[in-house]
Amino acid sequence: MLGRKKVMIVCLLLTYAIIAPVFAYLYFYATEPKYVAAGIILRTYDTPTMQLGFYWDETCTQPVSTFDFGNMTYPNQDTQLYKTIYIRNEGSVWNDIYWNSTLGSVTTQIGECWTRSNDWWGSWIWANNVNGTRIQPNEVLRTGYGVGIPPYATIGTYNWTLTIWGETYY
């Protein structure tokens, strides 16, 4: 009688060993997942605006679109001319500003630089380039764009394009 109970117990254990993994597979892998709220709401990020304004005045009422350094008769010494330009971040995010121009394709004799003002008196540091300057929303940055003309430069009319842009990441 004891042998019959042992056989019965062994059969039940084998049956359980076979059926349990099958049910586990059906329950965990073959059923559709259930979604449970976790208390987090994901929303789309508001698209930031990026816009720079260029002005002649600190109050940003006179926009700059073009400018002219005028006519010059042969300079007999190095001459530097510059224009003060105020840049305002009119967007909703900070910008790192960068610039380039086409002057190098027009002439190699005239040099150029776009710098930040280094003090309240308006003196310019030519090595203090605007490139990489961070400007916050609604901030106004005083800058100077200048050209350097060597003595006895080639006679002609020089026109070129300045490009300035902002970069941000979030």
Image: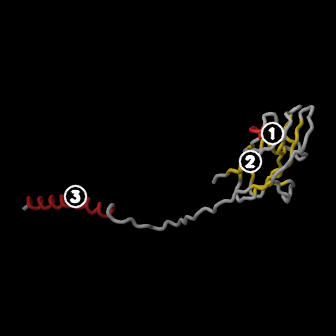
Q: Residue furthest left?
A: 1
Q: Are marks 3 and 2 in contact (CB under 8 Å)?
A: no
Residue indicated by mark 1: 112
Q: Amino acid at mark 1?
A: Glu
Q: Amino acid at mark 2?
A: Thr
Horizontal side of residue 33 vs 75, given as left or right: left
Q: Residues within 10 Å of mark 3 (few under 14, many from 20)?
A: few
Disc 1: CA contacts within 10 A as few (<14), some (14-19) or many (>=20): some
User: Which residue matches tag 3?
Assistant: 17
Spatial CA span between label 3 and label 2: 75 Å
| Mark 2 nearby-residue class (10 Å; few <14, some 14–19, many ≥20) | few
| Residue occupying image coordinates x 17% and y 61% | 12
> Could you tell me how far apart the alpha carbons at marks 1 and 2 are, in whole angstroms?
13 Å
Q: Inspect the image, locate mark 3, and give the three-letter code of the amino acid beneath it.
A: Ala
For residue 163, the mark is: 2
In this picture, is 158 found above or below 62?
A: above
Q: Earlier in the sequence, mark 3 or mark 1?
A: 3
Dot 2: element: strand
Among numbered discs 3 and 2, the one appearing first in the sequence: 3
